Amino acid sequence: MSEVPASSAADPRIGIRINERYELRRVVADGGTGRVYEGADVQMDRRIAVKILHDDIALDPVALERFRREYELSKSLPHEHIVDVLDFAHEPSLNIHYLVMEFLDGEELRYLLKREKVLAPERLIRMMAQVAMGLDEAHARGFIHRDLKPDNLFLCGTRDGDICKVLDFGSVKDRNARKKLTQLGTTIGSPYYMSPEQAQGLESIDARSDVFSLAAVAYECITSFVPFDGNNGPSILLAIMTQEPVMPTVRGAGAKYPILPKLDDVLEQGLAKSATIRTPSVGALADAIGRAYGIDGSHREWAYMPQAELAERVRVSMAKVPITLRMDDPFATSVPPAKVETAPIRAVSSQGPAPFAVIGNPQSPQGYSEPPLGLPSRSPWLLLGLIGFIALLVGGGLVVLVLK
């Protein structure tokens, strides 16, 4: 995540013009590799972002090559859902290396999650669809991002909803390149979102590694937790390679938005340890998430659908399909969908599932509707017990009740 930017007033670079073209106007972010400025391309008359590399980064030939590769990749892969990198050069008079990008108005997904904790289903579906549009194109050309995380997904607000841009292709693996920048056994990426094969530093990673990372991002957007945790980098990577994540319906119990049981299956496959059984593409993952919420179509349609329309589709779908509530009530029963008046909320007991599921209207005083005929409820059991007791007293015999 970017650090709090330094004051523009204290930065001597504010107001300078790089290469007689890029004018720096204010500091917008500080990161591990450089400081980012809002600027203006005076030749093209447009706003830009200029990243000036820290001195230690500029002295590292591998780091410099990664930035150069990011620039060259962007030129070969212009896409509306991948940030456009415009220039990369060295300015000898200032002794700086800089990267020029399109300027984006909005915020990183990381900041949104820090504030909101989780995403609304329609916002998640639209974002995942747009990320898939950009990444599937990159994957088709042999480029693996390797550092997908909330910090590298940027959301630009519009009237119809977010426009998502994938940032930072500096860690990209080019499967077509003969020259390798990463030594065998070296891990590249952010620990919380690394695939098992990436955590092991395997050279054989492919697009399915990005699928795992994007599934981890989706898990966090739904539950507000990362799927794998630890006290430090090695412990996180060990968890990724050896542990299974808690199902989203359990980890996110009580979240702001209902978590449908189908999402458990979708994210379980997306986070599969073995790439051979993992969801095959980011497009397939985006499709599976949307369909888990019960909407028709595919990510190619949802990417451009107004967020309000997606919200309505999700609302209608969730009103039709009841959401199972797990409770401790041993007399809990299932109610037909017709009994459900509003989209119910999923609740999970800490003591595990009860013998029956309760589905009902959370607005009702009891929390659930009357059980259908054919299933026991409290009052029939009490009545039968009372009748049997009276029969024993009156007849002096033994009455046996057989319930089917």
Image (cartoon, rainbow, N blue to C red):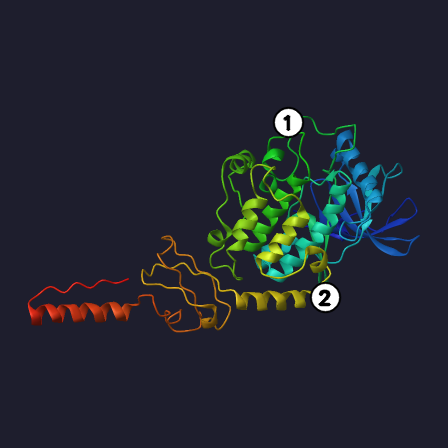
- Neighbor class of circle 2 (other Cα within 10 Å; few <14, some 14-19, many 20+) is few
In this rendering, position of residue 153 left or right of residue 382: right
Q: Up-down: is 35 above or below 296?
A: above
Residue 163 visible in the current orientation: no
Query: According to the image, label 1 marks what residue?
Result: 185
Question: Residue at point 47% right, 56% down?
Answer: 253
Residue 395 at x, y percent in the picture: 7, 70
Relative depth, front residue between 402 and 356? 402
Hey, which residue is sitting farthest left in the picture?
A: 396
Q: Earlier in the sequence, mark 1 or mark 2?
A: 2
How far apart are the two marked residues, 1 and 2, measured between alpha carbons? Answer: 44 Å
Amino acid type at mark 1 = Gly
Residue 105 at x, y percent in the picture: 75, 58
**Secondary-structure class at tag 1:** loop
Residue 397 at x, y percent in the picture: 8, 65
Q: Are marks 1 and 2 in contact (CB under 8 Å)?
A: no
Question: Residue at point 87% right, 56% down?
Answer: 46
Question: Residue at point 41% right, 73% down?
Answer: 364
Amino acid type at mark 2 = Asp
In this rendering, position of residue 278 left or right of residue 157: left
Query: According to the image, label 2 marks what residue?
Result: 160
Counting labels gives 2
State which quarter of the image contains the C terminus. bottom left
**Secondary-structure class at tag 2:** loop
Residue 120 at x, y percent in the picture: 59, 61
